[in-house]
Image (cartoon, rainbow, N blue to C red):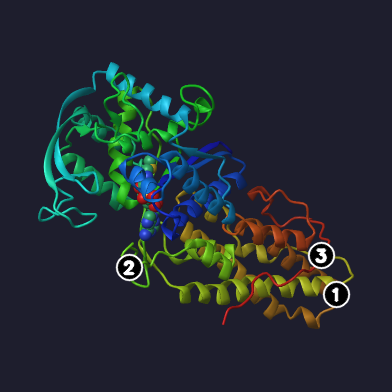
Amino acid sequence: MSSKFYITTPIYYVTDKPHIGHAYTTVMGDIIARWHRARGDEVFFLTGTDEHGTKVERAAKAANLTPKEFVDKVSLQYINMWKLLNISNDKFIRTTDPKHEKTVQDILRKMRENDDIYIGDYEGWYCVPDEAFFTDFQVKDGKCPECGRPVEKVTERSYFFKLSKYQKKLLDFYKANPDFLAPDFRRLEMINRVKEGVKDVSISRTVVKWGVPFPDDDAHTVYVWVDALINYVSALGWPKGSFDEFWPADLHLIGKEINWFHSVIWPAMLMSAGIEPPKKVFAHGWWTIDGQKMSKSLKNAVDPAEMSGKYSVDAFRYFLAREMPLGDDGNFSEKGLADRLNNELASDLGNLVSRVLTLAERYDGKIAGTPELDKHLNIEKIDKLMLELDTFNALTEIWSFVREANRHINEKRPWQLKGEELGSVLYNLLEAVRIISILIGPFMPETGQKISAQLGVKQKMLLSECKFGKTKFTVKKGEHLFKRIE
Ligand code: MSP
C-alpha cells in the first residue's frame, strides 16, 4: 500500500565543508527516500543548511565577506555536493530564507501564547575570543572546549522555554509511541535522561547578532538550535503549503550527537506550539577515519568528491550503506572502499551483468521459460528490512540474490546449451538482472539505470515490477559497470 513519506536530514552548519559525515546521512536519507519512491509512495525528501550564529559571523569576517555573502557561498558547496552524489532531495532549505525566519517567529509566538516562554537570567561559560557560550557540562577545567583558552562565567538576560513542563508529557509520548525513537538502545538512553530531569532551555541571545530577531524583542536573537529545528516545518510552508499533506515527518534521520535536540527539545517545542510531533527520529552512528576520530586538528576529514572521483559515485554510496548497519559506528578506509568495489561491485555484480548480457546478445532464439531463480528472491523480506531501516541486511539479502544468479550460470553452463534450453536459462538470468537493477537503484541510481538501459526494457523502477514475468528485452551490452582498482 502506498502512502506519503516525509524524510529529513539535519541541516548542516555552513562553518564546515561537506565531508563524509554529512554525506553519510544525506546518502542514507536518499537511499531511504528512493526506496519509498520505488514502493510508489508520495515522497518529500528535505535537506539544507543551518546558517545563523556567531561562528558564521566570525567565519565570514575571516573570509572577508559579509555573513550573507559567506552563507550563500558555502550553502552552494552543499548544493553542489548533493548534485554530484545524485541526491534526490525535493527541497533544499536555508535558515536565512525570509520565509523560514518568519515561521521561526510565528512558532515562538505560539509557544509564548501557550505560556511556555519567560525571560530570566542565563548563566553560563563564555569564551571571549570565540564569542561562544558553553554549559558546565561542556567546559572542562575552566577551558573552552573549542579553542582551549580560559572561559569566564557570565550572566545575561535570556528568554527561556519551559521544557521542564514537558517532562511527563514527553515520557507519556515515548510510551504511547514506542517507534518514535530508534534504534532501541538510543531510545532507552533518551528516556533515562528525560527521567533524570529536564531543565528549561535558554532560547535567545543578546550577544549574537547574526540570527533571527526574537519576536517582539529584537534586542535578542533566537538561539540557533530553535531556529534550526523549525526548518522541518517551515520547509513545508507551515501552517499552509504542503504541511497538511506531509506533516508529521515520517523520519528525521540524524547523527547520534544531536539526538537530544531532536528527541526531546523538538517534540516539546511542537507540543507547545500545538503541532503534532514527528513519527520517528533515527540516530545513526559515526564514522571514524582509519580508526581515528575525524577532526579539524588531525585534518583527516574525508572529501566525498575526491572519493567519488576516484572510485565512482555509486561505489562510494554503496560503501557507505554496506560498511556499517545504520545505527552502529563504523570505520572508513580507502582500502575498505577499494576492496568492496573490486569484490562486490566489479566481480559479483559487474561480472553477472556482463556475462548474462554477452550470452543474451549472441543468442537469437526465443527467450522464454519457467521461473526457477525466483525462489531465491524474497521481495517482501527486503522491503520489510528497508522499512525497519535495516539497510545493511536489506543489502545483504539483495547481494545473496546476485550471488545466486552467478551460481546459476556456473551450474547451468549456458555456453554449452542451445535452443529452448538456453532460452530458458537466459529467461531466468535476464529477469534476475532486471529485478536486481530495480533493487539496487535506490543505493546506486546510476548503475540501476545503466543496467536497465542495457537490458533494453521499459520499467518504472518500481518494486511492483520485481516479479518474474514476460518482459521484452532488447539487449544492448555496454561498457563494464565498474572499473577495478589495484
Ligand atoms: N546544524 C546542526 C543540525 C541542525 S538540524 C535541525 C548540525 N550540523 S552539522 O553540520 O554539525 O552536522 C551534523 C550531522 O553531520 C550529524 O548529525 C551527522 O548527521 C553528520 N555527521 C557529522 N560527522 C559525522 C561522522 N563522523 N560520522 C557520521 N555522521 C556525522 O549539527
- Alpha carbons under labels 3 and 2: distance apart: 50 Å
Residue 138 at x, y percent in the picture: 18, 50
| Residue at the spot of label 1 | 362
Which residue extends farthest top? 113
Label at residue 33:
none
Select label 2 or label 1 by which is in front: 2
Q: Quadrant of the N terminus?
A: top right
Residue 369 can be seen, yes or no: yes
Point out residue 15 in the picture as x, y percentages from the top left corner: 38, 50
For this orientation, the residue located farthest to the right is 364
Q: Residue at x 29, y 52 (%)?
A: 185
Q: Which residue is mark 3?
A: 475
Of marks 1 and 3, which one's residue comes earlier in the chain? Answer: 1
How many numbered marks does the figure carry? 3
Amino acid on which disc 1 is placed: Arg
Distance CA(mark 1)–CA(mark 3) = 10 Å
At mark 1, the secondary structure is helix
Residue type at mark 3?
Val
Label disc, if present, on residue 298 of the rendered structure: 2
Q: Name the secondary structure under disc 2.
A: loop
